[in-house]
Image: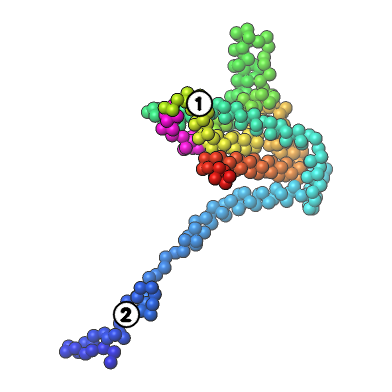
Amino acid sequence: MSGTATAAGDTVPGPKDGPRTAAPGGGPGAGARAPRGPRPGRTALFLLAPGALALLFTYAMPLVWVVRMALNEPLDGGAIRQTLTFGTFAQVLRDGHYWKVIGQTLQLGLLVTVFTLLLAYPVALFLARTTSRWRSLLMALAVAPLLISSVARTFGWMAILGNQGLINKTLQALALTDGPLPLANNMTGVVIASVEIYMPFAILAMISGFGRLEPELERAAASLGANRFAVLRRVVLPLTLPGVLTAALLVFVLSLSGYVTPRLIGGGRVFVLATEIYDEAITSLNWPVAAVLSVLLLVLFGIVIVLYQRAQRALERRFTGEKGASR
């Protein structure tokens, strides 16, 4: 029998009846398993799909179109011959004018990056170390220029740096100069305006990278007899270098791709890749050459990112001691 009869006529489940309890380890006595939840891999894929599709349509597909356009052949009058050739690349790389443009682009990026770091580092260090109740207000003031369009700020610098601008008028009124200084329509004015425009980005990047900096380390170094300069050189600078590298990467990339400031402050006399791409595409209607210059600019970005990653890994090895351990 599979069950035992009772006086009321009911049957008590025997050893072979009824649900069985799952035995530990999934042995012969294992019963029904608990329902499985959604797989983590599928959930992550579902969450990443919207962003991946957005990047596909807004970045990957335009990039493929630019590379494809660079392989076409330009004709007179803005016409384009659909083909697959590296002739346009060869034409650009053989032209000394484009090499000059690339050189000025790198020169602008380096100058703007160096001066921006020099001016932004003390501000970021102060904001990262201060315990004042006004810290939030000071942070807001440091990034307040980002609330104003870069175009508006560039026009403001045109009024300040021009021959009849504030700086030249003040210098002439104080009899410090006989005539206006050439501060606009050249590389000098572009660097000055770009440094001010990119300083808020550098300050934010540095503050976010100053996580290793602890006041206790500075006090410990001072208690061991180190003066302020030694503390700055041996403790503060090494611990803040990751933030400095991040700010340098951000400012350099922004200055390489900047268009508004070189165009307006440069007055058509400062040629960089961004302005040259615009001129080739809109003025000359030479889309294949503009696409080639865009590809070259992208290659410069890639080289900069590779150098940044190597510098970052070198810093990590220095802090974690992996280099010494490997020896």
Rendered image quadrant of residue 223: top left
Identify the amino acid type marked 2.
Answer: Pro
Residue neighbourhood size for the residue with mark 2, other residues' Cα within 10 Å, grouped as few (<14), some (14–19), many (≥20): few
| Residue at 39% over, 27% down | 132
Percent x, y of residue 21: 32, 76
Task: Depth check: give the residue in front, 82 or 252.
Answer: 252
| Residue at 70% over, 48% down | 66
Magenta segment includes 30? no
Residue lying at the far right in this picture: please name it: 76
Q: Could you tell which of marks 1 and 2 lies nearer the N-terminus?
A: 2
> Which corner quadrant holds the C terminus?
top right
| Residue at 23% over, 85% down | 12
> Can you see residue 325?
yes
Residue numbers of the magenta segment: 206-222
Residue lying at the far top in this picture: please name it: 175
Q: Which mark is residue 230?
A: 1
| Residue at 23% over, 87% down | 11
Percent x, y of residue 130: 42, 28
Task: State the SS at label 1.
Answer: helix
- Horizontal relation, residue 58 to residue 228: left or right: right
